[in-house]
Amino acid sequence: MTSTLLRGRTLSFVRWPQTIDDHSAWRYEEDGGLLIRDGRIVAAGAYTQVEKQAGEGAKKIDHRPHLLLPGFIDAHVHFPQMQVIASYGAELLDWLNTYTFPEETKFANAQHGRRIARLFLDEMVRHGTTTVAAYCSVHKASAEAFFAESHDRNMLNIAGKVMMDRNAPDGVLDTPQSGYDDSKALIREWHGKGRQHYAITPRFAITSSPQQMEMAGALCREHPDLHMQTHLSENHAEIALTQDLYPRSRDYTDVYEHYGLLGKKSLFGHCIHLSEREADALSETGSVAVFCPTSNLFLGSGLFDYQRFRHREKPIRIAAATDVGGGTNYSMLRTMDEGYKVIALNGEKLNPFQSFWQITRGNAEALSVADKIGTLDEGTDADIVVLDARATPAMRLRMETVETLAQELFLLQTLGDDRAVREVYVAGRAAKTDLAI
């Protein structure tokens, strides 16, 4: 069995770093080694020790002086919106009606879906992201295209066909029954195939009738091991319309609560304008609030209160995400740069170790897949990103004055993008190099 031995400066997290000096929260090797066999990390630590376990014939790749981290994880992204990103001048509901829904009608064409799925996963890998939680379009063929492309690349991805049966053009509507039937068929075909995970995906309460929400709840009851993903409390007009459509609900979160959609594998995009009751409901059920800073700023939706949600008496589990196409960049580095600013506007600071914890182990924990990805632990899947803090002239100049690992990470977060990603390994296979061939 062929083995690969990677050499470089390795960094992986064991828990949330309380402070910038909380060294026990991470493992860092100045001269580290990762031994990969059959797509998994079988040894990690100091290079001299790991090399002894490699044996004869191991392929050795030296990435020094670059950093090796777990591949980045994006917890909320819309793969059909690649040609929507960078569209001008709308808030959420106008954005959906003007740009998003017309674009998503194109995914009735299976060939279009296959092309965009390929380009989307190319872009993810280019930016160092090895796992996403993705929304497909309402069309079953869009999910089939996404999963087929993901499976061919042996990526661990979470995705689902959007369910939406009202308040949108006919070209992006299903029915309660067809949404249920298509989802069941996709679950049978794709969930657990290779590294694929299915997510039950009602887009949000506005575009799903009570009958469809019942169907989404039924799917969750029938498949309790699956993820559920939707949107919550992104925009004031959205909240008001939801209350009009569901007048018996106490609040927006109560709509999802009523249909049994809260839980430890439930991912709620945005969660900006939550009441204390709603925050308590998410906390008590272990549901996840997904922080999408570039999207929230671009659409003028508001500021996610990251530190308050973490530190309240009943804390909320948090993930971070690009939310492309409402989000403005495919890069988790760019996402956390904007996230830092959002958190600063709320009067707090996020130190760079916390940022990199969030987009690796933190997101893996939020997605309930930390046993497989998000760390460089032995026995986990070999999804790895190689980062170069001297990737551009501006970064090289700034690195002349960098003295600590924390400063280097903050430089990568603030100035880095896809150019800082030197290589990406997906299940042990070099994946970014392939994009250049």
Image (cartoon, rainbow, N blue to C red):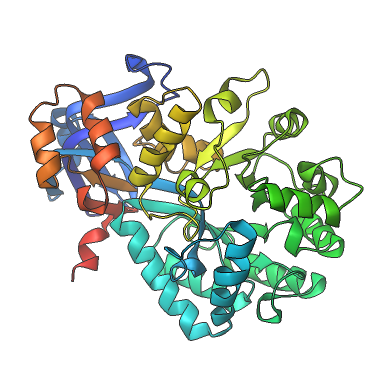
Residue located farthest toward the right when viewing the structure as drawn: 248
The residue that appears at 56% across and 36% down in the rendered structure is 304
Q: Quadrant of residue 19?
A: top left
Percent across and percent down for residue 71 are: 35, 46
Quadrant occupied by the C terminus: bottom left
Query: Where 8 falls versus 269 (above or below)?
Result: above
Quadrant occupied by the N terminus: bottom left
Determine if residue 228 is in view: no
Residue located farthest toward the front when viewing the structure as drawn: 89
Percent across and percent down for residue 85 are: 44, 64
The foreground one among 215 and 250 is 250
Determine if residue 437 is in view: yes
3 sits left or right of 293 in the view: left
Percent across and percent down for residue 266 are: 66, 45
Q: How many marks?
A: 0
Q: Quadrant of residue 127?
A: bottom left
The residue that appears at 45% across and 24% down in the rendered structure is 16
Percent across and percent down for residue 69 are: 29, 39
The residue that appears at 15% across and 36% down in the rendered structure is 51
The foreground one among 115 and 370 is 115
The residue that appears at 68% across and 45% down in the rendered structure is 233
